[in-house]
Amino acid sequence: MSTVKTPSRQQDQGSPYDSLLARFNAAADIINLEDRYRQIISVPEKIISVNLPIKLDNGKVKVYQGYRVIHSTVLGPSKGGIRYARFVNEEEVKALAGWMTLKCAIVGLPYGGGKGGIIVDPSHRSEDELERLTRAYTRALKDVFGENSDIPAPDMGTSGREMAWIFHEYSRTFGHEPGVVTGKPLNLGGSKGRVAATGRGVMITALCAIEKMGLDPKKLSCAVQGFGNVGSWAARLLSQKGLKIVAISDVSGAYYNHDGLDVEAAISYAERNKGTLAGYSGGTKITNEALLELDVDVLVPAALEDQITDQNAANIKAKLIVEGANGPCSSSADKILDAKGIMIVPDILANAGGVTVSYLEWVQNRRGHYYTEEEINEKTDPVLTTAFEDVFNTHKEYNCSMRLAAYIVGIKRVANGIKMEGFY
Ligand code: GLU
């Protein structure tokens, strides 16, 4: 499901890349990371900027700017989605690419990290225009993409539709190579379970945290910010595990019901309503900001970066934050949230279910053998619970936050890879 308008980020002191670097350096300090690894990992390997002239439906030409950032290829081909949003910028794509490197390392995938983006509001463009834009982006990056070099996937504002265009456009030059992109529609070599995967990972890692906290999921209330692919699946699966979903939101605003919302009804409403909750009457309308500050047990920010900053962190009442989005808490909020004793399942762990099933899609494409949804879940769930345990044990070992522990796990694996490969 895609949102109708692209939402906006809260004002913050720094960019998402500043947040990444602040955490990276704090984690690197804890483990006394040698300077050579610090230098290598703190910058992307490659930044590609492309200008894409597109003929609009009205006959005029408009040039769109796009990016692909390859942060790291130490542990394998770079992997990461492509974002279509009006606020996309180079610093954001750099941060998202860096988070992919750490995310893939934390779940133990044989991948590095990358990310792409185009500055476009997809809600203002027709399907034909978006197809031309996606094909132009693919042509511009045809020598970067490849099943053994750089493998894109969906992210905010893109879905299986765009992945099918990328696959087709790439195949026109290089022949049938479905492993060049993941998140494809099922009948074009996509994987069962891929659409639900990120939300499912949020549910799995949330349950791991709830267990560590000694809480009963059936007694917990939960607010979910964002009702796109990640938020809606997370809300659905968490409610199936007994959590009471009291608030959901999208760009149209937030909807609150103290007695719990009917998540299935909300999902069907949004599906019938062009992907938006606008006009949804299952709850009282509140603001997106108010949703974050609700007196709930669990908060799932699943919208976009910098939603919880030093401006509102002191007002957060949840005991547990599970980051469905990438970078929803800025580094300026870290100390405040930590001081409040809030348990955080950080983005690079909480939302790693998506790329884990992307990896299984890539494996299936290369083997030409396809798994059932049950098999996908059987393979994915333990990957996420093991990653959670690794991060949790690191958090205990170094007596640091779960976020810094996740960075430590990721950084150590990448640094080890660099060390083993050697320098020449
Ligand atoms: N865009 C998703 C993420 O941020 C998925 C990436 C992928 O599957 O490669 O994790």
Image (tube, rainbow, N blue to C red):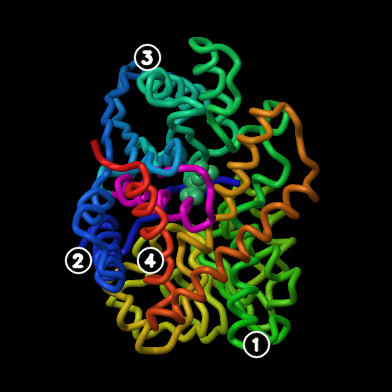
Task: Tell me which segment is drawn in magenta.
Answer: 92-113
Q: Earlier in the sequence, mark 4 or mark 1?
A: 1
- What residue type is disc 1 on? Leu
The disc at residue 149 is none
- The picture quadrant where one finds residue 59 is top left
Q: Which residue is mark 1?
A: 215
Decide: is 229 above or below 330.
above
Q: Which residue is mark 2?
A: 13
Q: Earlier in the sequence, mark 1 or mark 2?
A: 2
* Residue at the image point whose x is 38% and y is 25% from the top: 144
Magenta stretch encompasses residue 95: yes
> SS class of the residue under badge 1?
loop
The percent coordinates of residue 102 (x first, y second) are 41, 55
- The picture quadrant where one finds residue 76 is top left
- What residue type is disc 3 on? Gly
* Residue at the image point whose x is 63% and y is 88% from the top: 214
* Residue at the image point whose x is 52% and y is 70% from the top: 322
The percent coordinates of residue 369 (x first, y second) are 75, 31
CA neighbours of label 4 inside 10 A, class few (<14), some (14 to 19), many (20+)? many
Residue 163 in sight from this viewpoint: yes
Position of residue 70 in the picture relative to residue 267 (left or right): left
The disc at residue 59 is 3
